[in-house]
Structure formats: C-alpha cells, structure tokens
C-alpha cells in the first residue's frame, strides 16, 4: 500500500483562497480576533457534523469487525483517515467566511454600496422586491421564512452525505463547487461591501417583522453572519448548488429539495437580508462555481493520466 498522498485540486484552491484572505486582513489581527468568536463557530457543523457521523460509523464497524491481520486493520484505519481527507479541505469555506467577522476588515473594505444595489433594484422594478414583499408579511409567514432561511446550513451536509455514500466523484464536485462559491462570494464582499436593505434602509419598511419564534432562529443565524455579506447572496448561491447536485443525485432528491430551495430564495428578500440583484448574483455564482468545479476535476484527471507511468506494450 502506497503512503504517497496525492494533492487534489480542492487542496490547492483551498490553500490559495485562505492565503489570499490572510494576506488581505493580516495574520496578527486575525489571530487576536478569532479568539473572541466562539459564538460563531457553531456553523462549522456544515462540514464537521456529517464528517463526524461518517467517522463514528466507520469506527463502530472497525471496533466490532473480526480482526483480519495487520494489513486489513491498517486498511480499515486508512479508510477512516480517508473520510477526514475527503471532508477536511472544505472547512476552509466556513473558516474563510467567518473571517469576514473580523474587525480588521473595516480597514480593508471601502464604503458600503447599499445605495447602488438599491438603485439597481429600483431601476429594474420601480421598487425593490425586498421592500415590495412586505405587503405579505404576517407572523406565521415570518416564522416559516426564518426556517427556510436557516436551511442553507442544513441542506448542503444532508446532500453531501448522500453523495459521499453513493457517488464520490459527484461529492467532490459538489463540495468543490461550494468552495469556489465561497471564493467568489468573498471577492464580492470585498469589492461590493453591503449590509442589506433591512439594516441600510430601515425607514423603507413599515416596521420590524414579527413572529412567534422567528427572532430566536434569526438570532442564531445573525450570530455567525458576516456584517457585509449582501452581494452576492451566498444563501442563494449555496442553495442553488444544492439544487443542481440534487438533480444529479436523483429526480426524487431534486423534487424534495426544490420547494425548500425556492422558499430559501424568497426568504432572503422577505427577511430583508438581500436586494434582488444579490439573488441574481447568487444564481450566477452557483452556475459559475458548478462549471468551474467540473472543469477543475476534469483537468486534474487529465494531468494525472499524463503523469501516470506508461506500461510497456
């Protein structure tokens, strides 16, 4: 059994992505602020929870399976290591997103662009959909929308776990698309910093949204949100990637995901987190990310085939 670990395309992209953010915000400032961000790290469950579940299942099989000798035991331990190897690079996505909570970014980001984003919405529709949709507000709908908004952190690990068990290559492509989306979204946050209509233009709304439990749900979400993460909407981007790969998984998976993802898109406007142009940008990020992920894996396969030793005829 070879001990050589092959470098994967997601490793390279993740290291470049993280390195770029560290260079932008500064190592010292990041280290000093991360220590006070304990309340934000719960959303690491995006990757950690399914990875931990798979490791637990593999450990149980290893513990109770009859021993087959040294080589067999090493192979089973290697399988557990492979689970970590497959999932770990994608923690970069969440870690990098959380870095936008660092106070140091205030010295890097320019002026907020909320006025420009609202102007685009107004030019397209006469009134931003984020403002127009408030006519349908009700406590019951606000509660439903808060749950649908939260689903962008629930659906990806569920789909990723299903893909991991049935189609490893599509699993890699899915999470690579998520990683690419994170890189594109981070670029958007830097180039077009914006807080969203609810914060930037509270006077445009009749009053705060009311619900029986929505505030509790949104408080959890807000604890981990970057302060200027409006453009593009990664809520929309990630949920759209889920929809693309749910279709690849099966028609049933797509049918189950479709109403939830559609509700997630609407919730970003209803809850006043995003302008409609943010939603469009999220769709564009999802399309670009899935295409780039597929292309990168194809390129990796070609490079490995070219580097593989040729057997004599």
Image (spheres, helix red, strand yellow):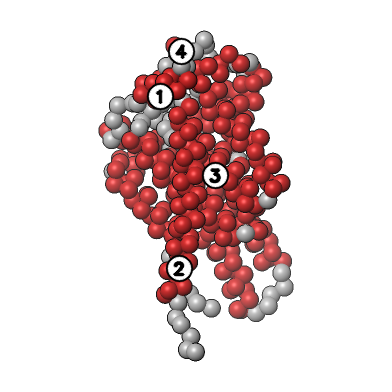
Measured as percent of width and height from the top left, residue 221 is found at 53, 31
User: Alpha carbon of mark 1 to alpha carbon of mark 4: how far?
Assistant: 16 Å
- The residue singled out by tag 1 in the image is 120
Q: Are marks 3 and 1 in contact (CB under 8 Å)?
A: no
What is the secondary structure assignment of the residue under circle 3?
helix
Task: First in sequence, mark 4 or 3: give its number.
Answer: 4
| Dot label at residue 302 | 2
User: Alpha carbon of mark 1 to alpha carbon of mark 2: how far?
Assistant: 42 Å
Query: Disc 4 vs disc 2: which is toward the camera?
Result: 2
Measured as percent of width and height from the top left, residue 48 is found at 55, 49
Q: Are marks 3 and 2 in contact (CB under 8 Å)?
A: no
User: Alpha carbon of mark 4 to alpha carbon of mark 3: how far?
Assistant: 32 Å
User: Alpha carbon of mark 3 to alpha carbon of mark 1: how far?
Assistant: 25 Å
What is the secondary structure assignment of the residue under circle 2?
helix
Q: Is residue 271 above or below residue 307?
A: above
Residue at x-position 56% and y-position 60%: 169
User: Alpha carbon of mark 4 to alpha carbon of mark 2: how far?
Assistant: 54 Å
Residue at x-position 53% and y-position 25%: 269
- The residue singled out by tag 3 in the image is 241
Q: Is residue 63 left or right of residue 207?
A: right
Task: First in sequence, mark 3 or 2: give its number.
Answer: 3
Residue at x-position 32% and y-position 48%: 20
- The residue singled out by tag 4 in the image is 204
Task: First in sequence, mark 1 or 4: give its number.
Answer: 1
Q: Is residue 143 left or right of residue 275?
A: right
Q: Is residue 66 left or right of residue 151?
A: right
User: Alpha carbon of mark 3 to alpha carbon of mark 2: how far?
Assistant: 25 Å
Q: Are marks 1 and 2 in contact (CB under 8 Å)?
A: no
Query: Disc 3 vs disc 1: which is toward the camera?
Result: 1
Residue at x-position 55% and y-position 64%: 82
- How many residues crowd mark 2 within 10 Å: few (<14), some (14–19), many (20+)? few
């Amino acid at each position: 059994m070879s001990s050589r670990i092959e470098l994967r395309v997601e490793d390279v992209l993740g290291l470049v992505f993280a390195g770029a953010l560290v260079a932008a915000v500064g190592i010292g400032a990041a280290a000093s602020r991360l220590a006070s961000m304990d309340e934000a790290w719960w959303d690491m469950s995006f990757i950690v929870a399914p990875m931990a579940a798979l490791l637990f299942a593999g450990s149980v099989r290893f513990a109770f399976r009859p021993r087959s000798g040294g080589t067999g035991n090493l192979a089973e331990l290697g399988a557990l290591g492979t689970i970590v190897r497959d999932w770990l690079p994608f923690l970069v996505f969440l870690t990098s997103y959380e870095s936008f909570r660092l106070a140091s970014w205030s010295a890097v980001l320019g002026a907020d662009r909320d006025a420009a984003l609202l102007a685009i919405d107004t030019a397209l529709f006469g009134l931003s959909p984020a403002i127009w949709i408030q006519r349908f507000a009700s406590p019951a709908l606000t509660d439903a929308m808060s749950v649908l908004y939260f689903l962008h952190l629930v659906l990806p690990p569920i789909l990723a776990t299903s893909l991991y068990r049935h189609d490893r290559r599509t699993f890699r492509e899915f999470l690579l698309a998520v990683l690419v989306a994170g890189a594109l979204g981070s670029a958007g946050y830097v180039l077009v910093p914006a807080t969203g209509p609810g914060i930037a233009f509270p006077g445009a709304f009749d009053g705060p949204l009311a619900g029986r439990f929505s505030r509790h749900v949104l408080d959890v979400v807000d604890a981990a949100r970057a302060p200027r993460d409006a453009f593009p909407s990664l809520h929309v981007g990630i949920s759209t990637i889920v929809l693309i790969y749910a279709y690849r998984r099966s028609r049933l998976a797509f049918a189950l995901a479709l109403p939830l993802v559609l509700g997630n898109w609407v919730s970003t406007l209803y809850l006043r987190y995003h302008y409609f142009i943010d939603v469009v940008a999220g769709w564009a990020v999802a399309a670009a990310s899935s295409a780039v992920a597929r292309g990168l894996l194809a390129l990796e396969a070609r490079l490995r085939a070219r580097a593989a030793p040729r057997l004599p005829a």
